[in-house]
Amino acid sequence: MEVLLQCVRCTILVLLLFIASAVWADGRSGDAKLDRAIEKANSEWAEAMKTGDAARIAAPYADDAVFVGFDGTCTRGRSEIEKMYRARFDRGGFAVSTKIETRNVTVDGDLAYESGYAQIGRKADGKTNIDGGRFLTVWQHRSGDWKIIHNLVLP
């Protein structure tokens, strides 16, 4: 039930983000520390997807973060998110190409809403298959650092 409530909250956050995106649409927040955290997390995600470094991907997540996959599957907690990525690497291998682009960042107090587009290329049967889609990442300012508290892969 708790995970279901988290998913409902995440869906509401998606709607709020699209309303707020009209206000801020250049991919920067105006908060230098947040912008650095986003750039670092996205850059490290892009490289770690190619090397299978699940710990590096999970590093910017809060201990109690929630990851919602495109199919609605919820994974709760940084350590579980790391395990999820390890399992994905075991099943599908590493990416041969990645792309992540932040399109909007909206700050509301100690929360920030980042939306954008990401894609992953994987080799299969001698050719590269590209999968991509939109995402929403909710960041929270905690003890001087910005941490990911919700990450949603949007269909």
Image (cartoon, grey):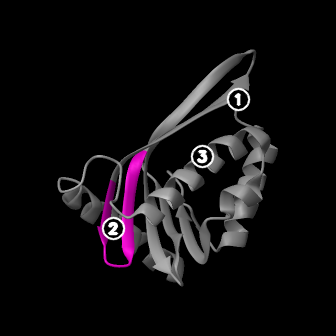
| Residue 71, horizontal then vertical, whole percent | 51, 53
Above or below — where is 137 with respect to 92? below
Q: Badge 2, how many Cα within 10 Å: few under 14, some, many 20+?
A: some
Among the 4 quarters of the image, the one containing residue 108: bottom left
**Of the residues tagged 1 and 3, which is closer to the observer?**
3
31 sits to left or right of 149: left
| Amino acid type at mark 3 | Ser
Number of numbered tags placed on the structure image: 3
Q: Are marks 1 and 3 in contact (CB under 8 Å)?
A: no
Q: Secondary structure at mark 2?
A: helix
Q: Which residue is mark 2?
A: 13
Nearer to the camera, 86 or 54: 54
Q: Is residue 19 visible?
A: yes
| Residue at the image position 34 percent from the left and 59 percent from the top | 29
Residue at label 1?
96
Q: Amino acid at mark 2?
A: Leu
Task: Give x and y (percent) for residue 134.
Answer: 42, 45
Q: Which numbered disc flags the more N-terminal residue, 1 or 2?
A: 2
The part of the chain drawn in magenta is 105-116
Determine which of the numbered discs, if any, sits on residue 43 in the image.
Answer: 3
Determine the CA span between mark 1 and mark 2.
32 Å
Residue at 33 percent across and 67 percent down: it is 13
Q: Earlier in the sequence, mark 2 or mark 3?
A: 2
Task: Give the residue at x 67% y 56%.
Answer: 57
